[in-house]
Image: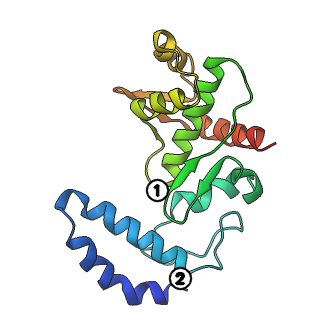
Amino acid sequence: MFEKVKEHLDEIVSIAGKCPEQYQVKCFEILLSALVRIETPSIRVGEGKPEIGAGERVVPKADFFPRHGLTEEEWSRVFDFDGSSWSIIAKLETKEKSKKQVQLALLLGTKSLLEGTEPIVSRSALVELCKHYATYDGPNFARHMKAQKDLFLSRGKDWTLTKPGQDRAAEAIKELAR
């Protein structure tokens, strides 16, 4: 199943090795992810789980949507995937700034998961996204997040999306896709 990927693995390692040391691991992950997507077109998000051999890693993005019963039609109304990165494209219907902020935080945590990392909600990224959606409420920003302790765990200035937060994010994606 991954024969073509195996053929190019040494080349990926070589290319990643040419990057500055602090970027080598991320470069390797990006290149490998791109190659897997190109060389395994029969594995599509939402069509079940591929068989995983010994030593192979399951990428969270391949699991998040089907695990939460999300179809490609639903998630593609909320996220855009250009083959290498994810963007939030949702139209938020609610007028309440606090609800919009929570929705955006859920989507950011999901985006982080889809990119193959931990479900981190970066404070700075959330502030920028809230400003983009004209929903930034500086005086109440932290309060809105603290009120959602079941969805987000504080990690310094950032937050991590909890398992219930991931479930709520999937519900939000379904709602936004309507």
Calculate the distance from the C-alpha at mark 2 to the C-alpha at mark 1: 18 Å
Q: Which mark is residue 129?
A: none
- Left/right placement of residue 63 relative to residue 127 reads right
Q: Which residue is mark 2?
A: 39
Residues 164 and 138: in front is 138
Q: In x, y percent, where is residue 124?
A: 39, 31
| Local secondary structure at mark 2 | helix
Q: In x, y percent, where is residue 121?
A: 46, 36
Residue at image point 67% right, 46% down: 78
Residue at image point 54% right, 53% down: 86
| Local secondary structure at mark 1 | loop
Q: In x, y percent, where is residue 177?
A: 76, 44
Q: Quadrant of the N terminus?
A: bottom right
How packed mark 1 is, by other alpha carbons closer than 10 Å (few <14, some 14-19, many 20 or more), is: some
Q: In x, y percent, where is residue 134?
A: 58, 24
Which residue is situated farthest in the right direction here?
178
Residue at image point 43% right, 51% down: 117
Residues 79 and 147: in front is 79
Three-letter amino acid code of the residue under disc 2:
Glu
Between label 2 and label 1, give the one nearer the viewer.
2
Q: Quadrant of the C terminus?
A: top right
- Left/right placement of residue 118 relative to residue 82 reads left
Three-letter amino acid code of the residue under disc 1:
Gly
Residue 56, quarter of picture = bottom left
How packed mark 2 is, by other alpha carbons closer than 10 Å (few <14, some 14-19, many 20 or more), is: some
> Which comes sooner in the sequence, label 2 or label 1?
2
Q: Is residue 25 above or below residue 121?
A: below
Which residue is situated farthest in the left direction here?
21
Structure colour scheme: rainbow
Total numbered labels: 2
Residue at image point 55% right, 49% down: 87
Q: Which residue is mark 1?
A: 116
